Image: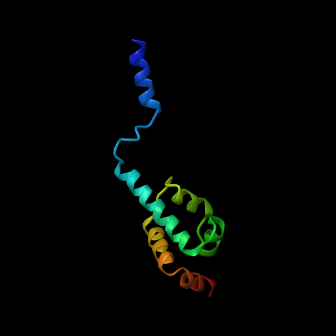
Amino acid sequence: MNANKDVIEKTLVEPDYDAPLTDEEYGRGLSAMRTRRARAATGLSQDAFAARFGIPVGSLRDWEQGRRLPDAAAQNYLRVITKMPDEVAKVLEG
């Protein structure tokens, strides 16, 4: 009887790494990758990227680590930064 209890407790505590991702998990992972790609296009640290593009650094960290999804506007903003980081920075400066 104790063996069954141990198996049940183990499955409640340990994640199943072979289980398929939920749509939400997949979306957060994809968004995290896109956010890191946008920052990589600039070569900036999280703090510098956040300051340069007016993004709260806590939000950037959450997005990059997949804890939160950026809203649709922020996702589009990151796409533009990825393609044209210098141009976006110039627009924000002036």
Residue farthest along the top direction in this orientation: 1
> Residue 54, how many percent across, how many down?
60, 72
> Residue 90, how many percent across, how many down?
59, 86
> Residue 27, how many percent across, how many down?
39, 57
The total number of labels drawn is: 0
Residue drawn at x 45%, y 73% as measured from the top left = 79
Give whichever of 21, 90 is nearer the camera: 21
For residue 68, side relative to residue 27 (left or right): right
Give whichever of 90, 41 is nearer the camera: 41
Give whichever of 70, 81 is nearer the camera: 81
For residue 64, side relative to residue 31 (left or right): right
Image color mode = rainbow
Residue drawn at x 58%, y 59% as measured from the top left = 61
Residue drawn at x 38%, y 18% as measured from the top left = 4
Quadrant in which residue 15 is drawn: top left
Up/down of 31 relative to 49, above or below: above
For residue 54, side relative to residue 25 (left or right): right
> Residue 48, how many percent across, how many down?
65, 70
Q: Quadrant of the C terminus?
A: bottom right
Up/down of 4 relative to 59, above or below: above
Quadrant in which residue 8 is drawn: top left
Quadrant in which residue 62 is drawn: bottom right
Residue drawn at x 42%, y 67% as measured from the top left = 72
Up/down of 38 relative to 60, above or below: below
Q: Quadrant of the N terminus?
A: top left
